[in-house]
Image: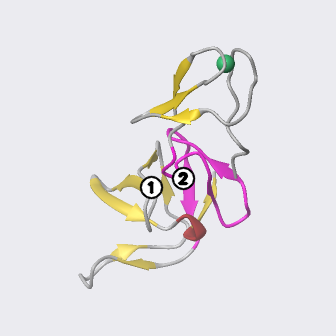
């Protein structure tokens, strides 16, 4: 959760909201809003924060869209990318890109 935005220059709270960020009513400083897609708060099954570039281990057998095969528990996924949404982890297994729920992995 982010707190109430404050101006990074004069630290006054309650900035004006602009199209892509904020503008301070006191000193006129404008700044961009922080990315708010939840990308900075994706946690694995153990509650560890995940980041793009991390390696993770799948802890549950995953079926992929009803196709035969899937991802077995214990599969390592290297160099994940966080994409947000219901399945915030984008990784590659055997050359195939898959999207995984954060609660089905742990940090390697
Ligand atoms: Zn200010």
Q: Quadrant of residue 43?
A: bottom right
Rendered residue at 69%/14% (across/down): 9
In this picture the colour scheme is secondary structure
Residue located beneath label 2 in the image: 38
Q: Is residue 108 magenta?
A: no
Q: Residues within 10 Å of mark 2 (few under 14, many from 20)?
A: few
In percent of width and height, residue 71 lies at 41, 71
Residue located beneath label 1 in the image: 84
Answer above or below: position of 62 versus 93. below
- Give the magenta range: 36-59
Circle 1 — which element?
loop
Is the residue under label 1 in contact with that under label 2 (CB below 8 Å)?
yes
Q: Earlier in the sequence, mark 2 or mark 1?
A: 2
- In this view, the residue in front, 35 or 51, is 35
Q: Residues within 10 Å of mark 1 (few under 14, many from 20)?
A: some
Q: CA distance from mark 2 to mark 1?
A: 6 Å
Is residue 51 toward the left or the right of residue 98 in the image? right
- In this view, the residue in front, 60 or 37, is 37
């Amino acid at each position: 959760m982010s707190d109430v935005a404050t101006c990074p220059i004069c630290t006054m709270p309650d900035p004006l909201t602009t199209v892509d960020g904020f503008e301070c009513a006191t000193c006129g400083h404008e700044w961009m809003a922080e990315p708010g897609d939840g990308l900075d708060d994706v946690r694995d099954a153990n509650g560890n924060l995940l980041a793009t570039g991390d390696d993770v281990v799948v802890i549950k057998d995953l079926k992929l869209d009803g196709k035969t095969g899937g991802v077995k528990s214990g599969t390592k996924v290297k160099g994940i990318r966080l994409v947000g949404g219901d399945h915030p982890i984008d990784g590659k297994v055997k050359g195939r890109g898959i999207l995984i729920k954060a609660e089905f992995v742990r940090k390697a």
